[in-house]
Image (spheres, helix red, strand yellow):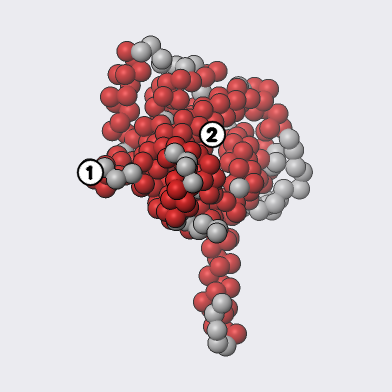
Amino acid sequence: MIEGAPWRRWVFFYIPLTLFVFVLLFPFYWMLITTFRPDGELYQPWNSPRYQPFWTSNPTLEHIKYLFNETLFADWLWNTMFIAAISTVISLFCGVLAGYALSRLNFPFAGSLGTGIFVTYLVPQTLLFIPLAEIIRNFKLGDTPWSLILTYPTFLIPFCTWLMMGYFKAVPRELEECARIDGASRVQAMLYIIIPVAIPGILSAGIFAFTLSWNEFIYALVFLSSPGEKTVPVGVTSELIRGDVFFWGPLMAGALLGSIPVAMVYSFFVEHYVSGLTGSVKG
C-alpha cells in the first residue's frame, strides 16, 4: 500500500488503476452493447439526435438468434471445445513429464535442452504451418479436427514444459527425498508427492494451453475449409465478413459468446492460476 498523503494514493494508485481497468474492460462492454443493439440503432448516423453510442434503448436477441439459426455457430463452438480440450490434455501430459525430467533428473545437456524447448516456443507459427501443412497432407488429415489436435501441441508442449520446469524447481527437493528414503520409487514420488503439490502450476499451464488453443487462428484457417469443421475464430470472421460487408451485430455476438468459456475457466481456477504464475508452494 502506498504510504503518504492522500493525493499520492490517488495520483499513483487509484487513478492509474481506474484508467487501466477502463481500457481493459471497455472492449468487452462494447461487445456486450453491440450484441443486444438492434440494427436500427447500430447503423444510426453518429450525428443523429437519436444516436446513443454507449447504450441501447431497445435491447434485442436477434443477433444471437441469427448466429444459431443462420450460421453453424453451435458446430463451431463444439469443434473449438473438442479441439482445445484434447490438445490441452495432450500438451499437459507431455509438458508435465518433460518439465519434471528437465528440472529433477541430472543428465547431460539438461539445461541446454530446456533452453532449446523454450526457443522452440518462440518460433512464429507462420513459419511452422508450412512444413506442418505438408505433414497433414501426407497423413490425409486435412479438413478434420485431428489436423489441429496434432499440430497445436507443437507450440503448446514447449510452453507447458517451460512453465512446469519453473514450478517443479520451486517444489522443495526434500519432499521427494523423504519419499525415496521411505521406499518409494521415483515414479511413485512423482505421482503421489510432486504432482499433487504442483497442481496449481499444472492448472496454470492448462489454462494457458486451453486459451491458446481456443483463440488460435492461423492453423485453423489453413487446415480447415468446410464450414461445419471450422472453429469459432475462423467461422465468425469468414462467414460474417463478406467482402466489405461486416455483420457487426452477429460478429460482436459471436465474439462475446466465444469468450465466455475462457472467462469461465479463468474464474473457476483464478486462485490456482495466480499461485501457479508466482510459483508459490504451500508447505
Left or right of residue 36, residue 23 in this image = left
Q: What amino acid is at disc 2?
A: Phe
Find the distance from the CA under tag 1 to the CA under tag 2.
53 Å
Q: Nearer the viewer, residue 27 or 88?
A: 88
Res. 245 visible in picture: no
Q: Nearer the viewer, residue 93 or 10?
A: 93
Q: Position of residue 23 (x, y in %)?
A: 54, 58
Quadrant position of the C terminus in the picture: bottom right
Left or right of residue 199, residue 112 in this image = left
The image quarter in which residue 22 lies: bottom right
Q: Which residue is mark 1?
A: 109
Q: What amino acid is at disc 1?
A: Phe
Q: Position of residue 36 (x, y in %)?
A: 70, 41
Label 2: how many residues lie within 10 Å, few (<14), some (14-19) or many (20+)? few
Contact (CB < 8 A) between labels 1 and 2? no
Residue positioned most to the bottom? 5
The image quarter in which residue 161 lies: top left
Element at badge 1?
A: loop
Rendered residue at 36%/47% (across/down): 103
Rendered residue at 57%/61% (across/down): 21
Rendered residue at 41%/15% (across/down): 141
Tell me the mark number nearer the camera, choosing from 1 and 2. 1
Quadrant position of the N terminus in the picture: bottom right
Which numbered tag is attached to residue 144? none
Q: Nearer the viewer, residue 239 or 198?
A: 198
Q: From what the image shows, is residue 224 above or below residue 41?
A: above
Who comes first in sequence, dot 1 or dot 2? Answer: 1
Res. 246 visible in picture: yes
Q: Which residue is mark 2?
A: 246
Q: Position of residue 240 (x, y in %)?
A: 55, 29
Q: Position of residue 138 (x, y in %)?
A: 32, 13
Q: From what the image shows, is residue 39 above or below residue 142?
A: below
